[in-house]
């Protein structure tokens, strides 16, 4: 697959894969995220041939369709179907036998170098996707925090060094900005409101690198217009970078048109209202996740998820942002996530509002 100079540059800057620690593995096992899988990532890497995948307009997609040896295909396809059954119906394969594996794609560009599996219903040609990736602790923490602290629920499983994720449906953010942002069917205020709320969700739980091509926009028809939700779809940069603004989507140049659109349709008081609404919702979700969030953050607090200089840079920036010197005592990214949640709660309380109690 031919690479542009920019692609080659970005490839050399990939975040390293961080192994799953014993603490995180224990959490995954406790909450049934660690499961026996019929096909591992290593097995998929043993493909025989790769063909560049071109989109409908003839452009290179950075994905390749891979081909396996004929004698392996039957067993491999059966194993992939069983993984899909695990994602969708907790492994009840009796309702999945009419499905078939249509294509397996591979992308060497992404951090996790994922495989994308397209699976098709033989009765009606309806298709779906799921992904098999290298298990990376940063990404797993990101997936689980998204599951617990966002309005979205995520299905994923691990097995050793393999990670399986369901497909997150929606319009890629860059395509939405190009084709949908000024669509008269969509109410501008709802787009602007969701950007503020998404920006706050990412910052509170320290999910980084939410450029337009790392999130999707979901449009849901309602009885008065359509509702908008922005969903993260890339979690590799959960608490890795040291820059504070790396965790605030509004500061990426790829999102500049969306931010300008927001500024044109929201005044400062309304934006602050939406920001505070989302902060409160995140804290409420944390309270409702009192069985899962504390052990997750306990495992995260002792995991070396980023270089020490990144941790130092981020804790200094967060301490200044919240005007809380005690944040300088944090030694890991996991401790910073926990401290950031508490700092947001204290800020709400100082404003004279009642904030949910979070047991971390």
Image: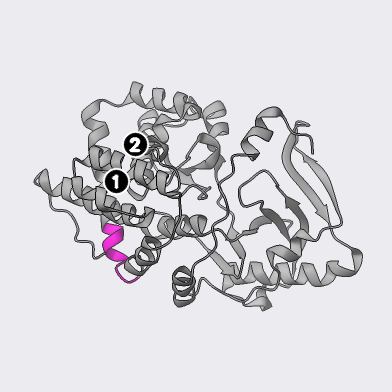
Which residue is depicted at the point 65% across and 67% down?
84
x and y percentages locating residue 190 in the rendered image: 37, 35
Crowding near pointer 2: few (<14 within 10 Å), some, many (20+)? Answer: many
Q: Is residue 245 above or below residue 220?
A: above
Which residue reaches farthest right? 70
Q: In this figure, which residue is indicated by the disc labeled 2?
A: 196
| Main secondary structure found in the magenta portion | helix
Mark 2 secondary-structure assignment: helix
Q: Nearer the viewer, residue 293 or 100?
A: 293
Q: Which residues are magenta?
A: 284-291
Q: Is residue 197 above or below residue 149?
A: above
x and y percentages locating residue 272 in the rendered image: 23, 35
Q: Is residue 290 above or below residue 141?
A: below
Left or right of residue 112, residue 287 in this image: left
- Work out whether residue 347 can be spotted: yes
Mark 1 secondary-structure assignment: helix
Q: Is residue 128 above or below residue 246?
A: below
- Work out whether residue 150 can be spotted: no
Residue 288 colored magenta?
Answer: yes
Image mark for residue 278: 1
> Which quadrant of the figure contains the C terminus?
bottom left
């Amino acid at each position: 697959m031919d690479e542009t100079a920019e692609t080659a540059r970005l490839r050399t800057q990939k975040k390293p894969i961080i192994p799953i620690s014993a603490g995180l593995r224990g959490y995954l096992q406790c909450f049934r995220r660690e499961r026996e899988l019929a096909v591992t990532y290593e097995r998929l890497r043993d493909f025989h041939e790769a063909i560049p995948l071109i989109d409908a307009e003839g452009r290179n997609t950075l994905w390749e369709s891979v081909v396996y040896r004929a004698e392996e295909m039957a067993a491999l396809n059966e194993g992939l179907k069983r993984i899909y059954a695990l994602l969708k119906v907790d492994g009840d394969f009796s309702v999945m036998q009419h499905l078939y594996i249509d294509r397996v794609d591979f992308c060497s560009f992404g951090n996790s170098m994922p495989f994308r599996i397209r699976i098709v219903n033989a009765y009606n040609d309806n298709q779906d996707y799921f992904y098999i990736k290298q298990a990376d602790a940063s990404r797993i923490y990101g997936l689980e925090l998204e599951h617990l602290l966002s309005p979205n629920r995520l299905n994923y499983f691990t097995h050793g060094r393999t990670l399986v994720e369901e497909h997150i449906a929606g319009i890629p953010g860059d395509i939405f900005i190009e084709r949908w942002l000024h669509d008269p069917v969509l109410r501008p205020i709802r787009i602007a409101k969701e950007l503020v709320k998404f920006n706050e969700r990412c910052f509170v739980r320290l999910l980084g690198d939410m450029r337009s091509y790392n999130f999707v926009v979901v449009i849901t028809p309602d009885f008065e217009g359509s509702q908008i939700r922005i969903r993260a779809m890339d979690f590799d940069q959960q608490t890795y970078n040291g820059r504070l603004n790396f965790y605030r989507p509004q500061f990426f140049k790829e999102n500049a048109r969306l931010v300008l659109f927001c500024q044109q349709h929201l005044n400062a008081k309304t934006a602050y209202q939406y920001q505070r609404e989302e902060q409160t919702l995140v804290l409420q979700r944390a309270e409702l996740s009192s069985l899962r969030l504390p052990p997750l953050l306990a495992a995260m607090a002792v995991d070396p998820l980023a270089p020490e200089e990144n941790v130092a840079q981020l804790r200094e920036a967060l301490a200044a942002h919240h005007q809380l010197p005690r944040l300088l005592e944090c030694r890991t990214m996991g401790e910073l996530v926990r401290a950031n949640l508490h700092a947001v709660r204290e800020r709400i309380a100082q404003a004279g509002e009642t904030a949910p109690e979070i047991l971390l």
